[in-house]
Amino acid sequence: MSAGPGTPSPAATGRTAAATATLAPDPRRALRAFVTAVEGALVEFFETRKALVEPLGPPFVESADVLREFVLRGGKRTRPSFAWTGWLGAGGDPDGPDAARVLRACAALELVQACALIHDDIIDSSRTRRRFPTVHVDFEQRHRERALTGDAAHFGVSVAILVGDLALAWADDMVNGAGLDPAALARFATVWARMRTEVLGGQLLDIQGEAGGDESVAAALRICEFKTAAYTIERPLHLGAALADADPELVAAYRTFGKDVGVAFQLRDDLLGVFGDPEVTGKPSGDDLREGKRTVLLAEALRRADATDPAAARLLRSRIGTDLGAGEVAQLRELLVDLGAVDDVETRITDLTERGLAALESSSAEPVAKAQLRAMALAATRRAL
């Protein structure tokens, strides 16, 4: 089914992205071309879902449309980009017959990301995402506007849970419909299953850690590893390597790079969650402080405060996770800086990134892919506050 005028077919999309990603001297140009290609594949996929959705009636059509808008609204397509570049680095042929099929399988990672974000926003009681209402808030508002019966907030959460579930189910559908040959699909599926389990496990670790009051840096780092690093960089690279039937040594190097850079990516995200510009992050300034997220930044601040400034420790524990005003957010930010927690996290980001890049550089990955992955790692970990 055509995705509409001006939208490349999946086959054309795969060839165009591959050629650009391989030949472009500017990695940013290559990534922009790949993002366009991924979005074309996603548009095509959503078109194929219409025949399945329409017989189920208007509520399901509306929910599927919201998912489509959520997925296509924005994002850097980080996960597909790492998977694709991992495939190229392991010898994948961007001009070969498998390129379009690989691209479609990589693009399915955006649906896993959609599931994670939709559910994460519910868990964190977030009201906005990328400057738009979160999915559960969107449906809560629709309930009120239509004067439906029952509790509007509960309705919004209930529908958003199902929309997130739909995204995860459709991620599997997109992979299975990508046209991979049976051997490649079998290799891909093994890593895919591990990745899905890890991201759900990381989310559960986060919830349990907050409820259990585990304030340690080690616990926060473990959540970073499984909630973010595994499905953001480590497993996407592993998926690309699996599609190319890479040797175990390259897989190990990719995973070291992916884990270290993925954790550094989350640490940068944690800093942005406290100090970031809302125009950049798409969320209210200081939202992570109001939500009481158990980040490495907070854990390190508490560790230092317990050792040197008990009054600061009491203030942090009493105010984090409450409805903070702008002045209180500013006070807590200053405290995090004064305690040295921000410098500590910056040092961790630098050390992890350098270690990950060293593993990549010593690997057997193709030189062009190495350069691309290096640029992607630096872009992910040096985002401005």
Image: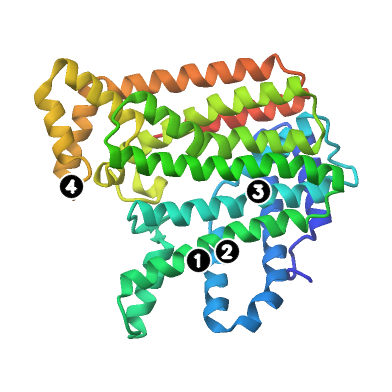
Question: N-terminal of the two: label 4 or label 3?
Answer: 3
Please say if the residues under marks 2 and 1 sit with CB atoms less than 8 Å apart.
yes
Could you give the CA–CA distance between mark 4 and mark 2, rounded to whole angstroms? 34 Å
Label 2 crowd (10 A; few <14 / some 14-19 / many >=20) = some
- Judge left or right: residue 198 versus residue 333: right
User: Please, what is the three-letter code of the amino acid marked with disc 2?
Assistant: Leu
Q: Nearer the viewer, mark 4 or mark 2?
A: 2
Residue assigned mark 1: 162
- Judge left or right: residue 150 versus residue 73: left
Q: Nearer the viewer, mark 4 or mark 3?
A: 4
User: Please, what is the three-letter code of the amino acid marked with disc 1?
Assistant: Leu
Tag 4's secondary structure?
Answer: loop
Residue assigned mark 2: 166
User: Please, what is the three-letter code of the amino acid marked with disc 3?
Assistant: Val
Could you give the CA–CA distance between mark 2 and mark 1, rounded to whole angstroms? 6 Å
Tag 2's secondary structure?
Answer: helix
User: Please, what is the three-letter code of the amino acid marked with disc 4?
Assistant: Leu
Question: N-terminal of the two: label 4 or label 1?
Answer: 1
Could you give the CA–CA distance between mark 4 and mark 1, rounded to whole angstroms? 31 Å
Q: Nearer the viewer, mark 3 or mark 2?
A: 2
Residue assigned mark 4: 324
**The C terminus, quarter of image:** top left
Tag 3's secondary structure?
Answer: helix
Label 1 crowd (10 A; few <14 / some 14-19 / many >=20) = some
> Is 46 in front, or is 295?
295
Label 4 crowd (10 A; few <14 / some 14-19 / many >=20) = some
